Image (spheres, rainbow, N blue to C red):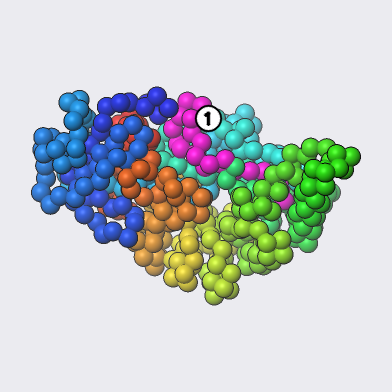
Amino acid sequence: MVPNEAVSKQPIIIANGYIRTMTEEPVFTGSILVQGSKIARIVKHSEPLEATGLKELLGVKELDVQIIEAKGKWVLPGFIDAHSHIGIGEEIYQHEGDDVNEMTDPLTPELRALDGINPEDQGFRDARLGGITAAFTSPGSANVIGGTGVVIKTAGRVVEEMIVREPAGLKVAFGENPKVVYGEQKKMPSTRMGTAALLRQALVDAQNYREKLEQGKTDPDKLPERDLGLETINLVLDKKIPLRAHAHRPDDIMTAIRIAREFDVDLVLDHCTEGHKIADLLQKYNYPTVVGPSLINRAKVELKDRTFETPGILAKAGLKVALMTDHSVTPIQYLPLCAALAVRSGMAEEDALKAITIWSAEILGVADRLGSLEEGKDADIVVWTDKPLSLEADASVVLINGQIVKPE
C-alpha cells in the first residue's frame, strides 16, 4: 500500500505508546490522533485507555476509527535519510537502473534527480519496512556540479506524490571522484585545483547571467538566452537552496567552505568523513554536516580514517549533524543501525536520534512538515517494538501521510 493525495477519511488513533516527539519534551505515555495526512492531536495520559476513553479524550466523534494499540511500544516520527541515491541508483539493476551520474560533462547543474527517480525501486520498500519515511536523493559525485536533489517520501505511485521539497540542494563534489572520472577522459578537472576552478567559474557565470537578466528588464536587447544550468546556480546565489558539497578530507572540506564564503552561499557538508580532525574549525564556521556512510569498507583512499566517532565529535562541538546511508552504498534500512553504532562510538543517544529526525529535517529545509511529532505536521509515524536504536527493535507499524504502509 502506498499513500496518495486521496487519503482515507477514517481517523487513526495510535494508542497508549511511549511517545518521543523529538522536540525538547521528554518521553511520555500518550496517544496520537491522525486525521487525513496530518497529526491532529497528541495527548498525554498516565493509564492505558480503551477505545471509548481514547475517543473522548481526543475529541473524536466518528464511529469508524482505526485504533493501533501501541502499549509497551515506542512511537517516533519517521526517520529521514539526509543523503541517498534512492530511486535513481536501483540496486538490483546495473546500467538499466543506474541514473546517478551523467559522466559526460563535469558541469551539469541543469540535471534534476527528480527526473530519474523510479518509485518502484526496491529500495523504497526496504526503507518503509525499516521505518525510514523520507529521504534526500541526489545525483552522484562524478561531476563538479551534478545537479539538484529532492526530498521525497518513501512511498508513492509516481514521484509527484512523493515530493516534499524540490529542488532541495545543488550537488557539488570535491576530492577523488571528479578528478578520476575526467582525468581518465583527459579533460578538466584532473586535479583538485581544476575542480575548484570550474566551480568558481560556474558561480561567476551565474552572477553575470543574473546581471544580464536584470539589465534585460529595462533593455530587452541585453536579455540573455535562457540557460537552465545558470538558472539553477542562481537559486544557490539567492540562498533559495544550499550547495550540497561532497567532501571527505579536511582539505576538500575547507575548499568547500572557502568557496561558499567567497560567494556568500549556504552550504551543507556531505560525508565529512574526516571532519573529526578539524571539529574546532568546523565549529567556527558552523555549517551543518551530513555524516556517512560509515557502515562500509575503506573502498578508496578518502575513506581510510572513516569512523563512527565522527558524528558524535561534531555534535559535541555544537554542530548540527545528520546521518546518511548514501543508499545503496549502505542499504537505507540500516539507517537506525548507523545511528546505534554512532551511539556506541560516543554520540549521545538523543543526538543520534535527532540526526535521523529533526536535525535531518532542519538541514533539508523541511522541518515545518517532518522530523518531529507535532500537531499539524505530516503523519509520518513509526511504532517500534522496543527502543528504536536497539537491535531488538522492529518497526511494527509505519505510517506515511497518515496511511499505513507497514504492515503492507
Task: Kindly tell me whether residue 313 is visible in this rendering.
Answer: no
Q: What residue would you read off at disc 1? A: 160
Residue found 40% across the figure and 49% down from its top = 371
| Viewer-side residue, 391 vs 41 | 41
Query: From the viewer's perspective, is residue 354 above or below residue 47?
Result: below
Region in magenta: 141-166
Q: Point out residue 402 in the picture as x, y percentages from the top left corner.
A: 34, 34
Residue lying farthest to the right in this orientation: 221
Q: In this view, does 165 lie to the left or right of 351?
A: right
Query: From the viewer's perspective, is residue 296 above or below residue 343?
Result: above
Q: Point out residue 106 in the picture as x, y percentages from the top left corner.
A: 76, 46
Q: In this view, does 185 lie to the left or right of 92?
A: right
| Viewer-side residue, 57 vs 146 | 57
Residue found 38% across the figure and 40% down from its top = 378
Task: Kindly tell me whether residue 210 is visible in this rendering.
Answer: yes
Q: Point out residue 327 in the picture as x, y percentages from the top left corner.
A: 51, 44
